[in-house]
Image: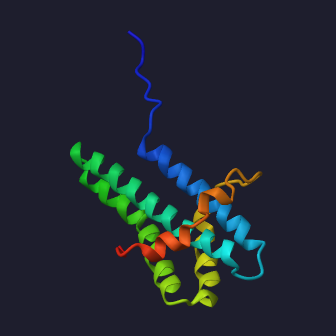
Amino acid sequence: MGRVIRTGDTPAKRRHQHLRSCAEVLHLLAKRTRFDAEARDMVAFFVFSLRGIAQTIEESAQSWENRGYWRKAESLRENWRWTRTAADELERLIRQDRWEAIPSVLLRLMPHFQHITVASITRNADWWCGALKALLRSTTTS
């Protein structure tokens, strides 16, 4: 009997996609000198991607807990807690219209994405177009 290989949608695969999106957005934002409408959408998209990472971490941690690996689950949550914290901080700054404070937050987050090489941009404006409007419309802040 052969090995069963899961090629479907997994939390790790989605997490990697969100990490890649964040790395590309950081790369593109680093080239900008100001926050125009597109850059603001990119930051809002970044918030959604951070929340996506946090969600996949919770799914993975839940799987570890279901197997009885409580320490591993809590370690995973602790190692990735920065995603939820950063998303909340960025959303707060966006809602307060404090765009001048956002570059320092993004700069602090850059080391978390250093391991991702951005040789070419695979995401385009369609990915983040309207993200700011969606973020401002949402009533839930985690």
Between residue 69 and residue 14, name the one nearer to us.
14
Question: Residue shown at 52%/83% (left/top)?
Answer: 94
Q: Is residue 114 visible?
A: no
The answer to which quarter of the image holds residue 116 is bottom right
Taking the image as shown, residue 96 lies to the left or right of residue 99, namely left
Q: Position of residue 41 (x, y in %)?
A: 61, 71
Question: Residue shown at 43%/77% (left/top)?
Answer: 88
Rendered-image quadrant of the C terminus:
bottom left
Q: Is residue 139 visible?
A: yes
Taking the image as shown, residue 11 lies to the left or right of residue 117, namely left
Question: Residue shown at 28%/51% (left/top)?
Answer: 62
Between residue 49 and residue 12, name the one nearer to us.
49
Taking the image as shown, residue 65 lies to the left or right of residue 141, namely left
Rendered-image quadrant of the N terminus:
top left
45 is higher (above) or lower (below) than 32: above
Between residue 112 and residue 48, name the one nearer to us.
48
Q: Position of residue 71 (x, y in %)?
A: 28, 56
14 is higher (above) or lower (below) than 95: above
Q: Position of residue 24 (x, y in %)?
A: 67, 60
Question: Residue shown at 42%/70% (left/top)?
Answer: 84
Between residue 10 and residue 69, name the one nearer to us.
10
The answer to which quarter of the image holds residue 127 is bottom right
91 is higher (above) or lower (below) than 45: below
Q: Residue furthest top?
A: 1
